[in-house]
Amino acid sequence: MAAITKEKLIETIKDLPETFSLEDLFERLIFLQKIESGIEQSKSDQVLSTADARAKLSQWLLK
């Protein structure tokens, strides 16, 4: 699981409106975590080519 730095957390909170729900905060944090995870996967070459992604997607859509 990708770690989020305090700096990114503070930046995320600063970007929220003056009043917000915890649900809004959690959604943003989950989104941020998914981005960080994707960056880590990309750096460790855990990615699919466009052709492989299209093939996998077509299999999902045919089910």
Image: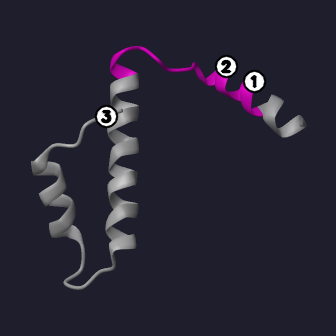
Say which quadrant the N terminus sits in: top left
Q: Amino acid at mark 1?
A: Ala
Examine the residues drawn in magenta and state their main secondary structure. helix
Left or right of 4 in this view: 50 = right
Q: Earlier in the sequence, mark 2 or mark 3?
A: 3
Q: Residue at x 67, y 20 (%)?
A: 51
Quarter of image, res 14: bottom left
Residue 28 placement (x, y as % from top left): 35, 61
Q: Which residue is label 1 attached to?
A: 55
> Rounded to the nearest whole Å, what is the CA distance between mark 1 and mark 2?
5 Å
Q: Which residue is mark 2?
A: 52
Which residue is nearer to you in this view: 58 or 33?
33
Q: Are marks 1 and 3 in contact (CB under 8 Å)?
A: no
- Helix, strand or loop status at disc 2: helix
Circle nearer the N terminus (1, 3): 3
In the rendering, at what x and y percent does residue 39 appear? 34, 31
User: What residue is shown at x 36% (from left), y 15% (from top)?
Assistant: 44
Q: Position of residue 60 (x, y in %)?
A: 80, 35
- Residue that numbered label 3 is attached to: 2
